[in-house]
Amino acid sequence: MKQHGITLIEILCVIGIIAILAGLIFPVFESTQRLSRVTISASNLRQIGLAVGMYETDYSDQTVPLYGSNPYISTDTWVYKLVIYGACPEIFSDPTRGQLPREFYYGDRKYFWNWVPHYGMNAYGYSMYTDGKDCSNDWGTGKLTIRHLASIEYPSIRIMVAPVTWGGQPVGFLYFKPAQASWPNLSIHVSNWDWYQEVWDTSPLYNQRVLVLYVDRHVGKIGAASFVDSKVYKTKGEYCQEMEKRNLFDTWGATWLNK
């Protein structure tokens, strides 16, 4: 009996089937990897919360200060304080963005890793408050006072730590300013440093939502409804009115109020 080898058409059919199967499998694999990285990021925030809790207990429920002196190259930051309380340095790297560099240069300025973590602290909604008078004059003279946990009215919805981005760079920053971070342009993501986009621009990493650690130390997600869109509400007066109307000061903190 005459035997035939595999024909070119049969080979092409097999290759075509393999390509179809790969097209079905690889997106699932990629989606699983992305979900895994987001899960690890949420775990990082929980571990940060545990270390914050130990600090607060030791300091009579005083919130963690942002930093001390010698900015950018000092180790006197909230990040390093938590490392002293047992937080592993690796938890300040967001796996959706890779490992933090040990040092980061921007122009002629040098930053140590603990100044540019992928997770930033809510500067004036958790850590401190100013001597401002109201939303339109939220800064006052710039005098800052450390908060105490008892003064925060709604710890279960007040953001303490959130992922932050330094547009286009492999790093984040030590903190975010709530009056700016809550007022981004929701229609864009920038490729440069921007206080207003610092938190919102991490949303593509988490399916258009942002992972956050709350003051009561549970982890959740916030979406566009937790921000005031600067493309729509363009003036400071409009921003303040919308924040008040939607009770968003409870979420972000009022810079000028010790609550």
Image: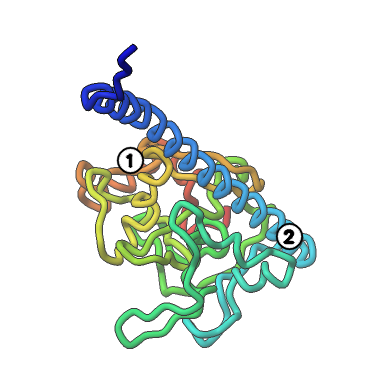
How dense is the environment of label 2, judged by Cα within 10 Å: few (below 14), some, or many (20 and up)? some
Vertical arrangement, residue 249 with respect to residue 115, above or below: above
Q: Pick out the residue farthest to the top.
A: 1
Count of marks placed on residues: 2
Name the mark on residue 155: none
Vertical arrangement, residue 79 with respect to residue 209, above or below: below
Report the front residue among 161 and 58.
161
Place of residue 23 in the rendered image (x, y in percent of width and height, measured from the top left): 33, 30
- Mark 1, residue position: 242
Q: Residue at x 64, y 43 (%)?
A: 218
Q: Residue at x 67, y 54 (%)?
A: 47
Place of residue 122 in the rendered image (x, y in percent of width and height, measured from the top left): 50, 58
Q: Pick out the residue farthest to the front.
A: 1
Q: Earlier in the sequence, mark 1 or mark 2?
A: 2
Labels 1, 2: front one:
2
Of the residues shown, which amino acid type is indicated by label 1? Glu
Place of residue 101 in the rendered image (x, y in percent of width and height, measured from the top left): 47, 72
- Mark 2, residue position: 61
Vertical arrangement, residue 211 with respect to residue 193, above or below: above
Of the residues shown, which amino acid type is indicated by label 2? Asp
Q: Quadrant of residue 36?
A: top right
Gap between marks 1 and 2 measured at Cα: 31 Å
Q: Residue at x 51, y 74 (%)?
A: 113
Left or right: 2, with 69 as reference point: left
Report the front residue among 88 and 147.
88
Report the front residue among 172 and 170.
170
Q: Quadrant of residue 54?
A: bottom right
Find out whether the residues at labels 1 and 2 contact each other: C-beta distance under 8 Å.
no
Vertical arrangement, residue 12 with respect to residue 178, above or below: above
Q: Quadrant of the N terminus?
A: top left
**SS type, badge 1:** helix
Place of residue 202 in the rendered image (x, y in percent of width and height, measured from the top left): 39, 51
